Image: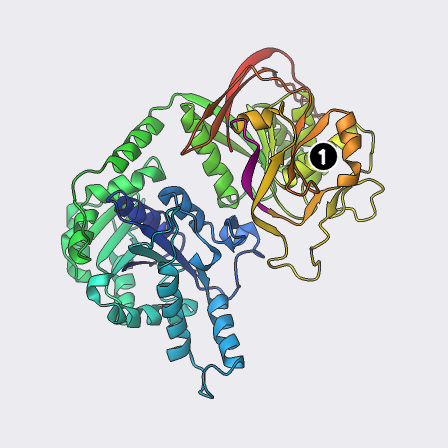
Amino acid sequence: MKYILVTGGVISGIGKGIIASSIGTILKSCGLRVTAIKIDPYINIDAGTFSPYEHGEVFVLDDGGEVDLDLGNYERFLDIRLTRDNNLTTGKIYQSVINKERKGDYLGKTVQVVPHITDAIQEWVMRQAKVSVDEDGVEPQVCVIELGGTVGDIESMPFIEAFRQFQFKVKRENFCNIHVSLVPQPSTTGEQKTKPTQNSVRELRGLGLSPDLIMCRCSTPLETAVKEKISMFCHVEPTQVICVHDVSSIYRVPLLLESQGVVGYFCTRLDLPVETRARKMLTKWKEMSDRSDRLLEHVSIALVGKYTKLSDSYASVIKALEHSALAINHKLEVKYIDSADLEAATLQEEPVKYHDAWHKLCGADGVLVPGGFGVRGTEGKIHAIRWAREKKKPFLGVCLGMQLAVCEFARNVLGWADANSTEFEPESKHPVVIEMPEHNPEQMGGTMRLGKRRTIFKSNNSVIRKLYGDVEFVDERHRHRFEVNPDLKHHFEEKGLQFVGEDVDGERMEVIELEAITFGNWSWKPPGWSFITLTLPLTFTRNIRLGRPPTCSGKFSISINVYM
């Protein structure tokens, strides 16, 4: 087993996740089997109870693990399936050590950070690195480990010490350290500054780890003199200083690394049994990246949510839309709309913000309402859903977005003015969305319906079923505590809202669609990516008046792509 540790310096959020994913990609393109582990030094057991503003979205795995969004990057780049144990946190390590101590596994010894915590970290990494992440069940050959945070953070010290010991345990030829640092370029001088990188590497070396590769994040390509200076002061060869400058797409990063001889270095340093010539997989990446840069036609999607100030809050949704737009040769424009800005209260307090939000919604080719928790902004989402339904705009509701679509239909079609979710209004006379019986309201972490679940299609004529390729069932990942009230199902279906997908027991409503939906055409692009192209006749003009939502008229057609 070969281990590649990715650390970061100077600032957090420097791009370690994309670089780790890109390293895995170029090694996989060489025919190697690659797995990945993300280490987060926070004390939380997992990411499940975080606000999206803390670390971005909570990524859900097949086994129900609620993990850091970087594991989503690993899965997308490497086409692998990870488990909850591929995300290691301080909380998990301390919990496992304390459980062992309570059982007497340490035979009365004093339990300390060194050696017990550091040993537990090393054992976890070695055990998880051997777990297959491919469908063939074969053990991986290379494990890419990303250490979150910044070198020097007090919470990451046990992990740094663990890997200091680890490099000797697994031997030098099986361990490699990549340090990602920042090379700022102040606008006042335009000069690329190396001092932050020098200090970061000095601190890392002082802790017992010497970087084999220094990957420099910068806005423009590194000048030769700057690269030589970093080489001289950081005790590496100039060829070991890799420039990772800003590029048009994150999918160009593997190509950028490969062009600077990273594969050749790994082959020599880790004695990898691979060829260093150009590989077919990276050729496809280059074709995709080139096509992405040449796109001329645009498609705009309004994302109506409550965490829109941080795009990472909806990272997987955005990536899915980007892949879908690329599949039909369109450049995606995501219009982030804070759902609270669509509500009447905003009109009274900040009318400009209100009208800007509605202006964005009117100008979009489709509307997407993603998941979320809490009552804030839900009425704005319902306004957007109603507008999309009445104006026949393409609409996709995910998780809470679907639940609110049911609430909107109940209020404005069934005439149940107080229809709501019991999450927001426990005393509603028409609880169209209810809490799942197994949920424990006194405990937040890990109590939702999580992971991959099967959805059975109940109608042969369902448009959604056709978009999935006319299959009998699909397996999708879930993360929710509430469900559509099955006792009220017949009221909706009588008025044209069909529950075309249910769980295997027929107790949970999984997929809804309006009965009267018609499509100009639809097509299916099989394995690899699942994309559906929808062409719909729509009506649209902008007419924003003070105190009133926009109205629409006039006709044209659009094409949007839905990623399944």
Residue 185 can be seen in this image = no
Q: Nearer the viewer, residue 236 or 164?
A: 164
Q: Residue 405 occupies which quadrant of the picture?
A: top right
Membership of 187 in magenta stretch = no
- Above/below status of 416 relative to 329: below
Q: Nearer the viewer, residue 10 or 42?
A: 42
Specify whether 541 is left or right of 257: right
Q: List x then y, in percent, for residue 262.
A: 21, 48
The residue tagged 1 is 406
Q: List x then y, in percent, for residue 397.
A: 62, 34
Tell me the kind of residue under disc 1. Val
Q: Residue at x 27, y 37 (%)?
A: 281
As helix, strand or loop, the secondary structure at mark 1 comes to helix
What kind of colouring is applied to the model shown?
Answer: rainbow
Q: Residue at x 52, y 54 (%)?
A: 65
Q: Residue 106 occupies which quadrant of the picture?
A: bottom left
Q: Residue at x 40, y 52 (%)?
A: 13
Question: Residue at the bottom extreme?
Answer: 108
Q: List x then y, in percent, for residue 250.
A: 35, 40
- Above/below status of 84 relative to 323: below
The stretch of residues the image draws in magenta is 469-478
Q: List x then y, in percent, for residue 37.
A: 39, 57
Q: Nearer the viewer, residue 340 or 462?
A: 462
- Above/below status of 87 relative to 318: below
Picture mark count = 1
Residue 80 can be seen in this image = yes
